[in-house]
Amino acid sequence: MNTKRVGDIGEERAVEFLKKKGYKILARNYRCRFGEIDIIAKHRDYFVFIEVKTRRYKSYGRPIESINGLKISRILKTVNFYLAQNRIYDSSMRIDAIEIFLNDSKNIEINHIENIVC
């Protein structure tokens, strides 16, 4: 299974997980000149921008570890562009991460980390 396929499976699982938790999915794979946001959702009064990281093997480390300062900077620029483009002002927002471990097709671990940027 190639990394694109692993990522796609992870994003599908993340969307299912979020919907079960009451999130309304607004966009997937939103792209602009600054970067990409995997999932944009609304939950209660928050716009939530979600970075999904999927791994097949824990030996490569936790997926959250791959979200470095440069990635956070790109996410923030992309979030600001999205908010401006959609004329969303004075709304609460946060940036989350979802780690997906694909141990096998039946054993999937999901870890939702809220508010990764303070």
Image (cartoon, helix red, strand yellow):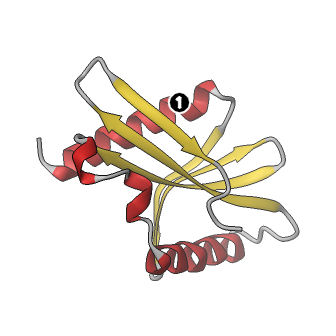
Residue 91: image x %, image y %? 84, 62
Residue 37: image x %, image y %? 49, 62
Residue 53: image x %, image y %? 39, 51
Q: Is residue 61 above or below residue 75?
A: above
Q: Secondary structure at mark 1?
A: helix
Q: Residues within 10 Å of mark 1 (few under 14, many from 20)?
A: some
**Image point (44%, 66%), residue name:** 67
Question: Which quadrant, please, contains the N terminus?
Answer: top left
- Residue 77 sits in quarter: bottom right
Q: Residue furthest top?
A: 106
Query: Which residue is labeled 1 in the image?
Result: 17
Closest to the observer: 104 or 76?
104
Question: Which quadrant, please, contains the C terminus?
Answer: bottom right
Q: Residue furthest left?
A: 1
- Residue 55 sits in quarter: top left
**Image point (29%, 48%), residue name:** 7
Q: Is residue 89 left or right of residue 1?
A: right
Q: Is residue 105 above or below residue 84?
A: above
Numbered label tally: 1
Residue 75: image x %, image y %? 53, 72
Q: Is residue 19 left or right of residue 28?
A: right
Q: Given the image, on which type of amino acid does mark 1 rest?
A: Phe
- Residue 44 sits in quarter: top right
**Image point (34%, 37%), residue name:** 101
Q: Is residue 104 left or right of residue 81?
A: left
